[in-house]
């Protein structure tokens, strides 16, 4: 859609600019002599309005020949040709108008006086049209940069949104309620264990809230959060939950976005282990090689259990966070075979800077 | 179960506790303990055990967890006698509506408080012996809206079988039952063919006859049979009658897929 036609105020401003331009035209013709200011104004004022309207078409020509991708020759030929054709037609219309005026007694012989200036009129038309072309190219550039800005903003809002969702998703209310139910059971049968679990839960919550404010944390910090989470789930699931961890020492100091692995581990328990009557195991492995940090979260699962929506959401969320943070530099691969569900993450290894 | 004790004349109730978490069962066990009129007949750690225990012990009421591995609380309801008073127990409040659709007596949220528990128990005692709505309604309520069944649950005595719909060859109506044919085995289930039809994905299952629904992928060919009808020959050689409307449905599905 034409930007000047979409808003009345823009069109008004554009036409407003044409008032001095029309004046300039009158001045030019007056200076070249042989015609009075009044006569020139009567002929040129409506012509200026007409040409202002006609020049709006330059927008489409500009759009069709983008400054960057069109060659110089094409640019020149297109716009000059358009300028000459339009200006010539315009001058001819002006001539017909002058002829019509000539029939009245007060404007006798106007046609001849107009003809004497037709060259100036055509050349001014070409010039005015080219000014418009320039103006529209600027307009296009402004619009493009605005769109780009909006896109950047959108992406950052999107990233922030994913981040927020990730953080909100951390403390799953069901996890909390189930844990509280376990504590409530333990208070009578094993008060010491109940207290221990209260403390684990408190630590888990405190860490989750604290980590949310940081932009990166060393893997070791995420691990200590995961250990608490798993210790709590272990109380709930008992022997049904088995856990193995293979993490090389040097990886523990690598930086990752906080709470990146927590949703994966939570999924592994909630959608893997919880669906297996006899339980299963969760494996967490991390390795750094060639400047990359590879992390694997793997769990046994029941492929026949109805696929759960929340699971997909959690994974999608991790993927979005990785994309927002590392763009193409990080990858996430999810595989599910008969009995194993596996999430592979690969991200740039960022060693923690040693504090001075 | 519910018998009158000779001395007090108070009614007694047999109860079942079904939850996959030991600690959750423990909470319920303790809460029930203060009620001498309630006798816990069995505790079950999953749906399979629950189905078995129900047919063995015939409880009056049951505390039933919703989220359990393989067989959910709703699946269990589908498979058991319809006169057990059910109290759902779960940490998830999103099933509350569904629970009442299947006429659960009450819906307890974990962690369970004493007062709320007493309330549910009183309610359950009053409703012991009431019949629940037919299986169709339970199946419809348990299924997430706008989603088709992904598996069917059937019971043969105390043995529960899960049939993923991909393995279902065809469904045959037999009086009040349907027979579900899967890999050469037939399972009977008390449900109407119409309710099964509406729960199955119409892009995969076609009602080819008043009494038959077929898994479209199993159909090897169609042969004319008699004046107005046809036969669907399945990959394993099974021959199923196809009515005129059934044939039209098959053709339109074929056209959709092409």
Image (cartoon, coloured by chain):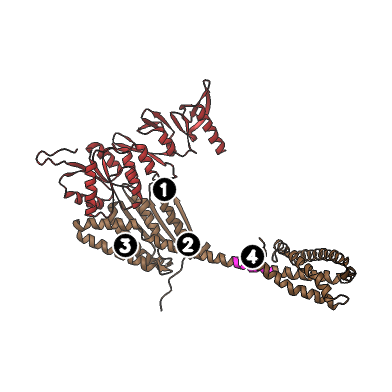
Q: Is residue B75 above or below residue A341?
A: above
Q: Nearer the viewer, mark 2 or mark 1?
A: 1
Q: CA distance from mark 3 to mark 2?
A: 24 Å
Q: Chain of mark 1?
A: A
Marks 4,2: beta carbons within 8 A: no
Does the segment drawn in magenta span residue A338? no
Task: Give the drawing colour for chain A.
Answer: brown
Q: Position of residue B37 (x, y in %)?
A: 16, 44
Per the rendering, the mark at residue A7 is 4
Comes first in the chain, label 4 or label 2: 4
Marks 3,2: beta carbons within 8 A: no
Check disc 2 and report its element: helix, strand or loop: helix
Which one is nearer the viewer's eye here, A283 or B232? B232
Per the rendering, the mark at residue A322 is 2
Comes first in the chain, label 4 or label 3: 4
Q: In this figure, which residue is indicated by the disc labeled 1?
A: A307
Which one is nearer the viewer's eye here, B132 or A329? B132
Comes first in the chain, label 4 or label 1: 4
Per the rendering, the mark at residue A228 is 3
Task: Give the drawing colour for chain B.
Answer: red
Comes first in the chain, label 1 or label 3: 3
Q: CA distance from mark 4 to mark 3?
A: 60 Å
- The image quarter containing residue A53 is bottom right
Q: Position of residue B34 (x, y in %)?
A: 16, 50
Q: Is residue B200 above or below residue B89?
A: above
Check disc 3 and report its element: helix, strand or loop: helix
Check chain identity for marks 2 and 1: say if they share one: yes
Q: What residue span does the magenta drawing correspond to?
A: A137-147
Q: Nearer the viewer, mark 1 or mark 3?
A: 1
């Amino acid at each position: 859609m034409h930007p000047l036609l979409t808003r009345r105020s823009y069109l008004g401003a554009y036409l407003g600019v044409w008032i001095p331009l029309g004046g300039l035209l009158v001045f030019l013709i007056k200076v070249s002599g042989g015609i009075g200011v009044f006569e020139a104004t009567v002929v040129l004022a409506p012509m200026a309005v007409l040409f202002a309207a006609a020049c709006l078409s330059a927008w489409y020509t500009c759009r069709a020949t983008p400054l960057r991708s069109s060659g110089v020759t094409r640019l020149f030929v297109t716009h000059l040709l358009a300028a000459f054709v339009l200006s010539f037609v315009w001058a001819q219309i002006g001539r017909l108008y002058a002829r019509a005026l000539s029939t009245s007694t007060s404007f006798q012989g106007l046609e001849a006086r107009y003809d004497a200036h037709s060259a100036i009129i055509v050349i001014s038309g070409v010039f005015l049209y080219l000014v418009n072309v320039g103006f529209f190219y600027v307009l296009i550039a402004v619009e493009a940069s605005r769109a780009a800005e909006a896109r950047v903003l959108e992406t950052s809002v999107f990233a922030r949104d994913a981040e927020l969702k990730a953080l909100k998703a951390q403390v799953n209310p069901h996890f909390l309620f189930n844990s509280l139910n376990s504590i409530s059971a333990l208070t009578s049968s094993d008060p010491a264990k109940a207290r221990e679990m209260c403390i684990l839960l408190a630590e888990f919550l405190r860490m989750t809230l604290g980590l949310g404010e940081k932009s990166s944390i060393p893997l070791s910090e995420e691990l200590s959060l995961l250990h608490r989470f798993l210790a709590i789930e272990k109380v709930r699931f008992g022997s049904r939950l088995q856990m193995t961890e293979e993490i090389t020492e040097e990886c523990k100091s690598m930086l990752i976005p906080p709470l990146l692995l927590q949703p994966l581990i939570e999924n592994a328990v909630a959608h893997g282990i919880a669906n297996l009557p006899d339980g299963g195991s969760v494996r967490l492995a991390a390795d750094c090689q060639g400047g990359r940090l590879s992390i694997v979260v793997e769990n046994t699962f029941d492929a026949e259990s109805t696929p759960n929506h929340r699971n997909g959401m959690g994974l999608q969320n991790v993927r979005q966070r990785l994309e927002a943070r590392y763009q193409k530099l990080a990858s996430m691969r999810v595989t599910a075979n008969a009995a194993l569900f596996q999430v592979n993450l690969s991200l740039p290894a960022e060693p923690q800077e040693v504090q001075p | 179960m519910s018998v009158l004790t000779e001395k007090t004349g108070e009614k007694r109730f047999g109860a079942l506790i079904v939850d996959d978490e030991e600690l959750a069962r423990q909470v319920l066990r303790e809460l029930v303990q203060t009620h001498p009129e309630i006798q816990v007949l069995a505790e079950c750690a999953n749906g399979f055990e629950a189905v078995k225990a129900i047919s063995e012990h015939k409880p009056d009421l049951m505390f039933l967890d919703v989220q359990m591995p393989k067989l959910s609380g709703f699946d269990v309801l589908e498979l058991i006698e319809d006169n057990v008073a059910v109290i759902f127990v779960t940490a998830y409040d999103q099933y509350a509506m569904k629970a009442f659709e299947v006429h659960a007596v009450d819906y307890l949220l974990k962690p369970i408080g004493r007062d709320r528990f007493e309330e549910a128990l009183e309610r359950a005692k009053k409703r012991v012996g009431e019949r629940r709505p037919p299986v169709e309604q339970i199946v419809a309520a348990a299924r997430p809206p706008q989603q088709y069944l992904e598996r069917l649950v059937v019971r043969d005595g105390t043995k529960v079988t899960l049939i993923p719909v991909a393995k279902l060859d065809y469904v045959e109506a037999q009086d009040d039952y349907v027979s579900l044919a899967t890999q050469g085995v037939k399972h009977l289930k008390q449900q109407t063919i119409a309710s099964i039809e509406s729960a199955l994905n119409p892009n995969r299952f076609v009602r080819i006859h008043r009494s038959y629904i077929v898994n479209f992928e199993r159909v090897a060919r169609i042969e004319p049979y008699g004046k107005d009808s046809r036969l669907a020959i399945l990959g394993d050689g099974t021959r199923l009658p196809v009515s005129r409307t059934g044939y039209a449905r098959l053709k339109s599905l074929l056209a959709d897929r092409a």
